[in-house]
Image (cartoon, helix red, strand yellow):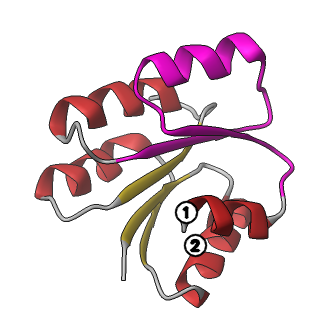
Amino acid sequence: MSKILVIDDEAILRDAIAEALRRADHAVDAFDSGRPALDAVAQGGIDLVISDLKMPGMDGVSVLEEAKRIAPDVPFIIVTAHGTVETAVGAMKKGAYDFIIKPFKLEELETLVE
């Protein structure tokens, strides 16, 4: 069982992702912003972080950069409705494992997580 953090300010999507991953037997903690999720990363035991790109306060790239400072080996997936090739390449250069454009099918994310 993997321990996964889901970060998204949109409650409906955050809850849908978390529930789909729980059904696939993953332990999931869901957050509506980056700072509390980073506290969880600092506590250790995290196998994957999935974060929205555009969020109030700390955006997904900032969360990615800080998470990589805390736990460089934890894979990080960026999810966004505002994706461009440049944004995806930038996120990957900063350490993102993958970049998913909304809308997407939950099955796509589940396959990527596996």
Q: Secondary structure at mark 2?
A: helix
The quadrant the C terminus occupies is: bottom right
Q: Residues within 10 Å of mark 2 (few under 14, many from 20)?
A: many
Q: Is 76 contained in the magenta span?
A: yes
Which residue does the numbered mark 1 point to in the structure image?
113
Q: Is 13 contained in the magenta span?
A: no
Report if residue 72 is visible in the image. Answer: yes
- Nearest the eye: 58 or 74: 74
Q: Secondary structure at mark 1?
A: helix
**Gap in angstroms between the C-alphas marked 2 and 1:** 12 Å
Q: Residue at x 77, y 26 (%)?
A: 83
Q: Position of residue 37 (x, y in %)?
A: 34, 51
* Left/right of residue 44 with respect to residue 5 in the rendered view: left
Query: Where are the magenta residues, as a range?
Result: 75-104
Which residue does the numbered mark 2 point to in the structure image?
18
The quarter holding residue 99 reads top right
Give the amino acid type for the residue marked by disc 1 in the picture: Val
Residue placed furthest toward the top: 86
Report if residue 59 is visible in the image. Answer: no
Label placed on residue 58: none
The quarter holding residue 15 reads bottom right
Q: Residue at x 78, y 27 (%)?
A: 82
Mark 2 or mark 1: which is in front? 1
